[in-house]
Image (tube, grey):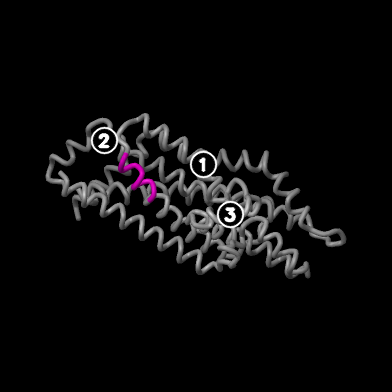
Amino acid sequence: MRTLNALIKRNTKLFFKDKGMFLTSLITPAILLVLYATFLGNVYRDSFLMNIPEGIKVSENIINGLVGGQLISSILAVSCVTVAFCSNFLMVQDKSNGTVRDLTMSPVKTYLLSISYYISSLISTLLICFVSAVVCLVYIAFVGWYMSAADVLLLMLDIFILVMFGTALSSIINFFLSTQGQISAVGTIISSGYGFVCGAYMPISQFSDALQKIISFLPGTYGTALVRNHSLRGVFSEMENQNIPSEIIESMKDAIDCNLYFFGNKVDVSAMYIVLCGTVALLVGIYVVMNLLKKKVK
């Protein structure tokens, strides 16, 4: 246990000591928030207004709350995975510079080293994502706050599970990487592509039917939907209190993926948690088996 704790501390310290890697991971969510608010805010606003029939009045505060909730849910859903890849690149760097050979030649067990990479990456990513969540909540407080204490706690739970998912996924992919060039290539692909396939950049409801069915098999989609539901639950509840027809509210939920459908069947929130948690357990299990098989081969 002492060896594992020492390895976790070592990996975590090295991540935060690398100013370039740390600052990139920390600043990226803040930059995304500014870019989203500047360039996508009006797009989201127009999208909500298009779903409101003539004669139905919705206050400006509610519209701002809807736009803000969609903005922060998109940012947090993406950051939980992309930051996990950044923080987990230390595993690849150790291979690239030969540090891993020095570690494995010592009495350190291989499985302890693998576990330490996962846990330290999880800790680093959680710290950054929770800080990002606080920044996002401050933004929501300025534009239109409708979240309850329960919504905030559930949002933090969503972030925790998504970070576990992102860390497990990055651990499996980084397992096969060994050079700086591969790190750059994978980082670019994940940063640019994940937001689309998880429905953060563009709602899945706007994709073709065939693509929607394919994306419905991806666990990240359900993680995004969970963050959306808990970021926007209070706004939709306020809309109900103002006697806005439930049909309009449901159409909005469909449009921004609060409601997800698997081959035409609506997926409830509890099922989303089951899918995401089950995927985390599966990915962690695969990562463990990969390291055990590697040990046997050696």
Q: Quadrant of the C terminus?
A: top left
User: From where the camera sits, is residue 141 visible?
Assistant: no
Between 280 and 15, the one lying in front of the other is 280
For marks 3 and 1, give the CA distance: 16 Å
Q: Earlier in the sequence, mark 2 or mark 3?
A: 2
Q: Which residue is mark 1?
A: 193
Is residue 170 on the magenta stretch? yes
Between 133 and 260, the one lying in front of the other is 260
Name the front one of labels 2 and 1: 1
Query: How many other residues sit within 10 Å of disc 3, few (<14), some (14-19) or many (≥20)?
Result: many
Measured as percent of width and height from the top left, residue 51 is found at 76, 57
> Does 206 sit left or right of 104 as displayed?
right
> Does 117 sit left or right of 255 as displayed?
left
- What residue is shown at x 49% (from left), y 54% (from top)? 220
**Does dot 1 land on a helix, a strand or a loop?**
helix
Q: Main secondary structure of the magenta part?
A: helix
- What residue is shown at x 41% (from left), y 54% (from top)? 165
> Total label count?
3
Q: Which residue is mark 3?
A: 212
* Residue closest to the far right: 55
Q: Earlier in the sequence, mark 2 or mark 1?
A: 2
* Residue closest to the far front: 210
Q: Magenta segment range?
A: 169-176
Q: Which residue is mark 2?
A: 95
